[in-house]
Image: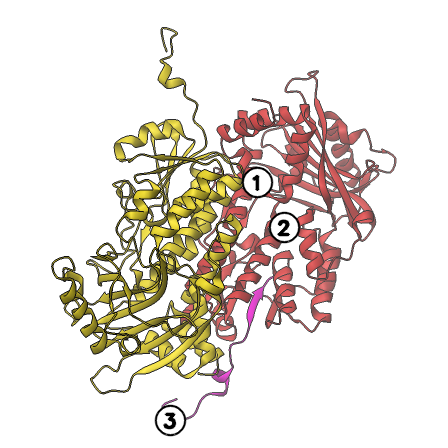
Chain colours: A red, B yellow
């Protein structure tokens, strides 16, 4: 500069929003910005084809508030009448063998939908690129952030599994867990008849964990996701370690045995002759330590990076809120970007404030659901749900509005107050 | 209790919301709750008659966003076509005598309105009680709070001038001022012709302070509020100390002399023959130390008290935001109460979060407007307003949306970015 020449590399003008990650958070944000004419670039470490052909990413369903956002984004490709599900079914096993279980339904006001992300994400990437969106296949690590911050006015880190999430310090004292409270085994299965109408079953085996059974659309058509949430040391923990690849038949027999022993509300619809994992890649095993991180960090040159989705917070999948939370946060961040084009600390704080109540409610509600021993007021609410369809429906529909659920469950007093309003004081 | 007898006094059932204070905050909240069927009691240390006959309370105008709330509350009694005003006029004196002043207008999208609170508040109390509202004339001090907390499910302290505000600790480090930055002299005057169309004049005398001239409806009809914002040590400071009661004529002559010396955009419409204060009670002199306090405190028995309006934060009146802020906060608190009937700490935090951005923006914007020396980026914006009607209009209309104003003024970079978007890079 002093001699009047500007190196060619440095005259690149920073433009638009740099979004790292092509999960639901990154794509919903990218599509939102595209819709509003804000330049954005999505960086993905995988091509759409690699995503489609890869290992299963999760066993997530989108609740209707998320579907409504998909409609607004023009990516509602799966008719709810065909692909949706309409209610929950709850099964709570007795704490002792032989004790009478609780079984009760709960209805949504509007349907939810489970689409395998290996179908969902590539389709949304097609939408984004088909509309002219800038999509770049490029792995991004912490070392790339300084350059990206020069290339873009704002960086959004929406890649939970990259090394970038750890740049956002975890909030101390926000999680009640030091170790993952559940060990997970999620897979896609054939040979389980759907309920009529289609529904998700939430089955609780006290002391051992939960099973989520989710009607799911994958590349193989309509299949069933089974997500075993296994308490460490419980009878089903073995599912988190069993190796499908070493002996598929033994793995499937084990799953079936655990289903029969703990989750009769699901096993009663299994056809043993056709039951099985839909493929070796249709399985994920692991564990999640609930973590919530700082909303944003300051980069060089006064630029900021905002954490979105799993990069901001991860929750156990027991109530399937992670993806819905990511979509919601993407929407709120998009709205903040449209309202205020100055991406400084004030902007970051405003963006954080918009999502705070729901994100915190999801975090706390999820952690309560897997607490051991179960909180008495949670058991009280579950008992009331088994006796009152109205309460069960409200709890079920609140999967769309986690902050309302937390209004009911944040304290024993709140649960008592809620039950009192329903005449169960 | 141990002997099985419950003293009669303690079986009173806590009911509804206890609102301490019948200013705009308390009344707008009370009316909002009434509209939504939530029991509330307003405690006022004055009767409507005492309020009507007392000393002037302020020189405030309600911007259109506040008027819109009044319409929703059914208390919009003053037709905007007759009582409203439609724009600002800005006069900025040159820093040295003889330097050319800046004069420029700015339009609202929808009118504002100035009604003397001695007319306004009694009328709203009538509305509230006429609809069956519980209004109690009773001074409430800190010693009464424990009993009130037993009588009500939630206490709202909306009485800035009572000793109750000090129960909410001031937030350290939130104000740039250790002493009041302006000494005030506000009064109602006859003998000043209105502009056509009716407007507020904001006149700046560099180094000495500001004058706000506001068309105001009082018990005497259409009059003019003059609010002198006097810099300590400046030429107009004497107005904050001059005693009207000792020599009315001398006081009025002094006001007229200062008007002529510093605020020609107002003095040019004065008819000296009829000019004068409308009455000995139509004057307030004093000073305000900008203060923002904790949103809520915990009382005995797990009950909470929330600070509202002046009890939560006080700002210098230079941009007339205090009452509008109080009304906005009352509305947001009312909405929070409707949404969530459990008045615990979660509730208090949610209520605080709803109003935070606007309340903080008002606080910071007001403090910036009276900073000395003036911030260069504020001067830059004022200069741009004098050159661009579009910018002046946006600044003016943002009196309705203080958080948008702060988006423009929070940092020099933001002001530059705003001017750049208006082609003034």
Q: Position of residue A239 (x, y in %)?
A: 68, 36
Residue B228 quadrant: bottom left
Q: Are marks 3 and 2 on the same chain?
A: yes
Tell me the magenta residue range: A1-22
The extreme left residue here reads B246
Q: Are the residues flagged by discs 3 and 1 in contact, CB closer than 8 Å?
A: no
Q: Nearer the viewer, mark 3 or mark 1?
A: 1
Q: Residue at (35%, 66%) from the top-left corner? A: B214
Kindly report the distance in space between the C-alpha atoms of the residues bearing marks 1 and 2.
Answer: 18 Å
- Image quarter hosting the C terminus of chain A: top right
Task: Identify the residue position indicated by label 1 in the image.
Answer: A404
What secondary structure characterizes most of the magenta part? loop
Q: Position of residue B233 (x, y in %)?
A: 14, 68
The answer to which of B157 and B359 lies nearer the viewer is B157
SS class, disc 3: loop
The extreme right residue here reads A273
Whether residue B216 is in magenta: the answer is no
First in residue order: circle 1 vs circle 2: 2
| Direction from residue B392 to residue A358 in the image, left or right | right
**Within 10 angstroms of label 1, few (less than 14), some, or many (20 or more) residues?**
many
Q: Nearer the viewer, mark 3 or mark 2?
A: 2
Q: Position of residue B286 (x, y in %)?
A: 20, 57
Task: Identify the residue position indicated by label 3 in the image.
Answer: A3
Q: Residue at (36%, 73%) from the top-left corner? A: B412
- Image quarter hosting the N terminus of chain A: bottom left
Task: Identify the residue position indicated by label 2 in the image.
Answer: A323
| Direction from residue B301 to residue A14 in the image, left or right | right
Subunit of label 1: A
Residue A99 quadrant: top right
First in residue order: circle 3 vs circle 2: 3
First in residue order: circle 3 vs circle 1: 3
């Amino acid at each position: 500069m002093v001699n009047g020449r500007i190196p060619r590399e440095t005259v690149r003008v920073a433009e638009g929003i740099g979004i790292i990650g092509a999960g639901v958070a990154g794509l919903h944000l990218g599509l939102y910005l595209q819709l509003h004419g804000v330049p954005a670039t999505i960086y993905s470490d995988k091509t759409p084809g690699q995503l489609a052909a890869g290992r299963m990413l999760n066993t997530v369903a989108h609740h209707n508030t998320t579907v409504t956002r998909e409609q607004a984004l023009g990516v509602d490709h799966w008719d709810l009448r065909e692909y949706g599900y309409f209610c929950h079914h709850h099964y709570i096993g007795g704490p002792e063998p032989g004790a009478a279980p609780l079984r009760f339904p709960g209805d949504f006001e509007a349907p939810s939908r489970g689409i395998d992300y290996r179908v969902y994400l590539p389709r949304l990437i097609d939408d984004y690129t088909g509309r002219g969106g800038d999509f770049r296949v490029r792995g991004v690590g912490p070392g790339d952030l300084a350059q990206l911050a020069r290339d873009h006015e704002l960086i959004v880190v929406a890649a939970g599994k990259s090394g970038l999430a750890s740049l956002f310090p975890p909030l101390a004292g926000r999680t009640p867990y030091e170790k993952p409270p559940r060990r997970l085994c999620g897979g896609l299965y054939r040979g389980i008849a759907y309920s009529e109408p289609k529904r998700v079953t939430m089955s609780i085996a006290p002391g051992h964990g939960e099973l989520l059974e989710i009607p799911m659309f994958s590349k193989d058509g309509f299949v069933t996701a089974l997500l075993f949430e296994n308490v460490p040391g419980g009878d089903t923990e073995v599912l988190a370690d069993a190796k499908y690849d070493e002996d598929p038949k033994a793995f499937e027999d084990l799953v079936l045995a655990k289903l029969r022993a703990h989750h009769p509300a699901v096993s009663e619809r299994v056809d043993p002759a056709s039951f099985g994992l839909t493929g070796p890649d249709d399985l994920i095993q692991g564990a999640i330590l609930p973590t919530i991180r700082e909303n944003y960090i300051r980069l060089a040159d006064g630029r900021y990076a905002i954490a979105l989705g799993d990069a901001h917070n991860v929750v156990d999948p027991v109530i399937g809120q992670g993806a819905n939370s990511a979509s919601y946060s993407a929407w709120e961040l998009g709205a903040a970007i449209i309202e205020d084009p100055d991406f400084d600390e004030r902007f970051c704080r405003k963006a954080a404030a918009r999502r705070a109540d729901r994100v915190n409610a999801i975090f706390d509600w999820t952690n309560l659901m897997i607490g051991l021993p179960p909180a008495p007021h949670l058991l009280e609410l579950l008992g009331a749900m088994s006796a009152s369809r109205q309460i069960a429906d409200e709890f079920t529909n609140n999967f769309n509005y986690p902050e309302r659920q937390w209004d009911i469950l944040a304290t024993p007093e709140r649960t008592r107050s809620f039950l009192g309003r329903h005449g169960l004081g």
